[in-house]
């Protein structure tokens, strides 16, 4: 689909019905005004969009502008459509590390896959300098990982009370992927080795979900959970149906 960008200028729309500029508008006064094809209102052509009209009634730039020659186009939204700057691409990965999950062998495969995706820059939005990531692991406890770029290795912080969750060092849990790239790669390499001797059969999935939400609630993003164990610890927020 052709894309149309007005960069920092307003997208041309009818001042009355707000219809977008399209191949069926008609031009007046040698292109200085145009008639909306939807409501018939007459609009002034702003200077940044002005072009002279040829004898056949088409603009001289008709063939260069997809919005005049294509039935469907994609208008690129600019700052006038935003109440705030767009949030950075954000990803939180949460791994079930209970004994049934570790015994399945999934953790090494999951970490290797995520590492490969990051190395090949296949994570959506990763190509810029704004992508952010965070990692959690959980069995009957929830573990956070400090990936602050000034550290030499990832720092694990464990919360043992899954019913009263708090965020240790919240500013260091969600980090810029580019700044903390080496620490993220190191964590993905070593994470499967951290839990090889685990004996805990249950997973505190609900507590981990609360933690994940707390980490990214101010910025939004995508949470990717790897839940394997069927033995999920009961939680006050998860009550059986009557």
Image (cartoon, rainbow, N blue to C red):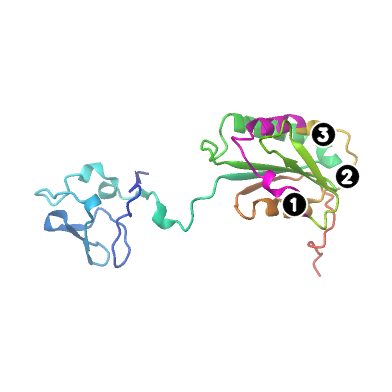
Q: For mark 3, what is the residue?
A: 194
Give how far across and how far down residue 197 sits, in percent.
89, 34
Q: Position of residue 58 (x, y in %)?
A: 16, 50
Cα–Cα gap, marks 1 and 3: 21 Å
> Which residue does the numbered mark 2 point to in the structure image?
201
Q: Residue at x 67, y 47 (%)?
A: 171
Q: Is residue 214 left or right of residue 55?
A: right
Q: Is residue 143 visible?
A: yes
Which quadrant holds the N terminus?
A: top left
Tell me which residue sits at (78%, 39%) in the image: 156
Mark 1: secondary structure = loop
Q: Which residue is mark 1?
A: 167
User: Is residue 178 on the magenta stretch?
Assistant: yes
Quick one: 37 or 223, which is closer to the camera?
Answer: 223
Q: Name the residue at 82% across, 45% down.
A: 158
Which of label 2 and label 3 is nearer to you?
Answer: 3
The residue at the far left in this view is: 55
Left or right of 129, for residue 59: left
Camera-near label (1 vs 2) is 1
Please provide the residue range marked out in magenta. Answer: 166-190
Upstream in sequence: badge 1 or badge 3: 1
Horizontal and vertical percent position of residue 53: 13, 50
Residue at the far bottom: name it: 242
Please tell me whether mark 2 sits on a helix, a strand or a loop: loop
- Closest to the camera, between mark 1 and mark 3, is 1
């Amino acid at each position: 689909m052709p894309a149309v960008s007005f960069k920092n200028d307003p997208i041309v729309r009818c001042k009355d019905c707000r219809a977008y500029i399209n191949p069926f508008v008609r031009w007046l006064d040698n292109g200085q005004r145009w008639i909306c094809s939807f409501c018939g209102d007459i609009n002034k052509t702003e200077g940044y969009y002005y072009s002279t009209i040829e004898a056949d009634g088409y603009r001289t730039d008709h063939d260069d502008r997809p919005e005049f020659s294509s039935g469907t186009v994609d208008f690129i939204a600019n700052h006038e459509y935003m109440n705030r700057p767009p949030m950075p691409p954000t990803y939180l990965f949460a791994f079930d590390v209970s004994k049934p999950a570790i015994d399945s062998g999934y953790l090494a495969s999951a970490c290797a896959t995520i590492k490969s995706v990051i190395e090949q820059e296949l994570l959506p939005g990763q190509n810029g300098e704004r992508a952010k990531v965070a990692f959690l692991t959980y069995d009957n406890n929830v573990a956070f990982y400090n990936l602050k770029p000034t550290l030499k290795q990832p720092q694990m912080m464990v919360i043992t009370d899954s019913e009263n969750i708090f965020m240790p060092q919240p500013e260091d849990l969600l980090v810029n992927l580019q700044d903390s790239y080496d620490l993220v790669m190191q964590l993905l390499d070593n994470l499967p080795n951290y839990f090889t001797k685990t004996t805990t059969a249950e997973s505190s999935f609900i507590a981990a979900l609360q933690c994940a939400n707390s980490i990214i609630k101010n910025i939004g993003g995508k949470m990717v959970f790897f839940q394997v164990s069927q033995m999920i610890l009961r939680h006050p927020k998860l009550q059986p149906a009557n």
